[in-house]
Image (cartoon, rainbow, N blue to C red):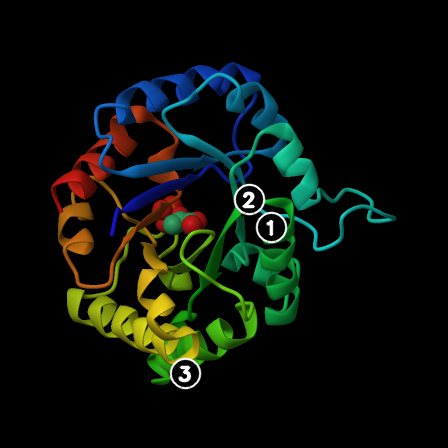
Amino acid sequence: MRKLIAGNWKMNGLLAELEDVAAISEAVAAHPSVDTALCIPATLIRPAAGRFADMAIGGQDCHMAVSGAHTGCVSAEMLADAGAKLTIVGHSERRAAQGESDADIRGKALAARRAGIAAIVCVGETEAERDAGQAEAVVLHQLTGSLTDDATGDWLSVAYEPVWAIGTGRIPSVEDVAAMHAAIRAALVARFGAGGADIRILYGGSMNGENAASLLAIPNVDGGLIGGASLKAEKFLPIVAAAASA
Ligand code: PEP
């Protein structure tokens, strides 16, 4: 399976930062064996999407409706119209700050499919849930509720992102990542049959140039979702290079 390395710029990036997108796009072109994407603020999608061919440009969220009275929201059709090829849905920052439920996230994933773009569906446990021995149960519950019945690997990826590892510089042990990704894979195969083996499972949470090679070598780690290290080419490129040699 080709690995996918997707960046998440979160609420960072003005038009002036398009030069950083350009630098990242040029750098990742050296690794055509890896699928790469950059999920940037909605305001930058149109100027970025037409300009950089080596890397998919995506959004970070979408509304489940096509259009309507949803002030401040962006639909999947609007993302596609702006040139996005994918969107993240269900990031833990949105689950926590916007109170998004698994059903909301399932609706957003369906919206992405309806609009003809790919979806990265995020799941992950909090530190308290891990400490309580509930990590796998929490993640598998989120997975069941957040995925649509027609999930296939050509438009959907899962990102396992332990909440306590996001932006903290802490990562789970190789054994813990391996166990969680194996559990997610087993759940995908149980639900979707052989097609569940083709759905990429990304790891996200403080992945960087130093730890990427060991994380990406773990069975069932089919790529990464990268926050902080995706903002600059010199931090993102070593992760893409690690994926190319994994
Ligand atoms: C994220 O927010 O999805 C993420 C993985 O962030 P970071 O890489 O900064 O931990």
Quarter residue 221 falls in: bottom left
Q: Alpha-carbon distance for marks 3 and 1? A: 26 Å
Quarter residue 199 falls in: bottom left
Report the disc number at residue 117. Answer: 2
* Location of residue 40 with respect to 214 vertically, above or below: above
Q: Which residue is mark 1?
A: 112
* Location of residue 31 with respect to 147 vertically, above or below: above
Residue under the point 82% across and 44% down: 71
Task: Determine whether label 2 and label 3 are within 8 Å by CB.
Answer: no
Q: Amino acid at mark 3?
A: Ala
Give whichever of discs 2 and 3 has the lower sequence position. Answer: 2
Q: Please, what secondary structure does the residue beneath circle 3 have?
A: helix
Residue under the point 51% across and 56% down: 91
Residue under the point 24% across and 66% down: 177
**Label 2 Cα neighbours within 10 Å, binned few <14 / some 14-19 / many ≥20:** many
At which x and y percent is residue 51?
48, 16
Report the disc number at residue 137. Answer: 3
Task: Determine whether label 2 and label 1 are within 8 Å by CB.
Answer: yes
Report the disc number at residue 170. Answer: none
Give the label, 2 or 3, closer to the camera: 2
Q: Please, what secondary structure does the residue beneath circle 1 have?
A: helix
